Image: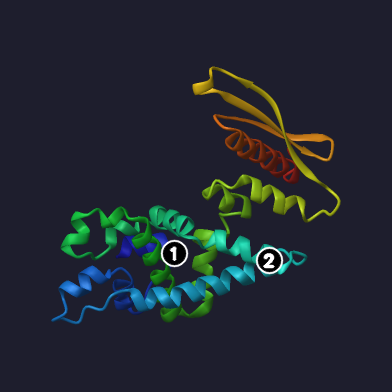
Amino acid sequence: MRALEDALGYRFKNAELLEEALRHSSYANEHRGGAAVSNERLEFLGDSVLGFVTAEFLFRRHPDAPEGELTRTRARLVCEDSLHEVARRLELGRYLRLGRGEEAGGGRERASILADATEAVIAAVYLDGGIEAASALIHRVLLDDVTEVRAAENRLDYKTALQELVQRTPGRALSYRLTGEKGPDHAKTFTVAVLLGDEVAGSGNGHSKKEAEQMAARDALERFQREAKGGS
């Protein structure tokens, strides 16, 4: 557990909280005669703590963003894919307590189990160290390293991320234009340009028009990010 605490950047005063956070219901069900309690209650609490900290982060970071945009961004940041990625970086799977059946079925790699364990660990930190400790952990493993664009990338929804970015500046219209296609019918490659007004903002290729549009939106997002950082 010390290695996991190092990864979390937090030392528990009550180590049992961390152990409970890593105890899957399948393990608890197999040890009903003992004192084993699953992480389901901690998962419930962690979901709320994560939601609150993320909402405050977005509220302060984007003072002009409307409620709908904040809600969608928060949903992407705290979705199962994002939490699964956090769990992978922390190597939570190594520390899980699983029942025999779940262990045999590959539970240590299951996205839903790892995402739930991430929420449970957040709750454990909250109960052990308070909201400041939990907030510091959430920022360290999720918010400080994950932008709204990266959250959209986890869902492969670059078009939505680009649309939300452009909407912050009224009067700028996005459109997509097919600029080329090549190859036989069974293996065509399409090229699409995304335009901001009359100017090309990005371009991309794909095996379908939708995929090419996503890649064009991704190219535009990356260009905007470089410009925001002062790059070329």
State the CA–CA distance, disc 1 to disc 2.
Answer: 33 Å
Q: Image height check: is 185 above or below 130?
A: above
Q: Quick check: 28 left or right of 78?
A: left
Outermost residue toward the left in this view? 33
Which residue is at a point 44% across and 78% down the rendered structure image?
45
* Coordinates of residue 163 in the picture (x, y in percent): 71, 50
Q: Nearer the viewer, residue 168 or 208?
A: 208
Q: Quadrant of the C terminus?
A: top right
Question: Which numbered dot is residue 68?
Answer: 2
Q: Quick check: 99 left or right of 187?
A: left
Asked whether residue 73 is in view, the answer is yes
Q: Nearer the viewer, residue 81 or 13?
A: 81
Which residue is at a point 42% across and 76% down the rendered structure image?
44
Question: Which numbered dot is residue 9?
Answer: 1
Q: Nearer the viewer, mark 1 or mark 2?
A: 2
Q: Earlier in the sequence, mark 1 or mark 2?
A: 1
| Crowd class of label 2 (few under 14; some 14 to 19; many from 20; radius 10 Å) | few
Disc 1, SS: loop
Disc 2, SS: helix
Query: Badges 1 and 2: C-beta atoms under 8 Å apart?
Result: no
Which residue is at a point 83% across and 40% down the rendered structure image?
197
Q: Quadrant of the N terminus?
A: bottom left
* Coordinates of residue 112 in the picture (x, y in percent): 37, 60
* Coordinates of residue 180 in the picture (x, y in percent): 67, 23
Outermost residue toward the front in this view? 185
* Coordinates of residue 220 in the picture (x, y in percent): 70, 39
Q: Amino acid at mark 2?
A: Gly
Q: Quick check: 26 left or right of 39?
A: left
Q: Amino acid at mark 1?
A: Gly
| Crowd class of label 1 (few under 14; some 14 to 19; many from 20; radius 10 Å) | few
Question: Which numbered dot is residue 188?
Answer: none
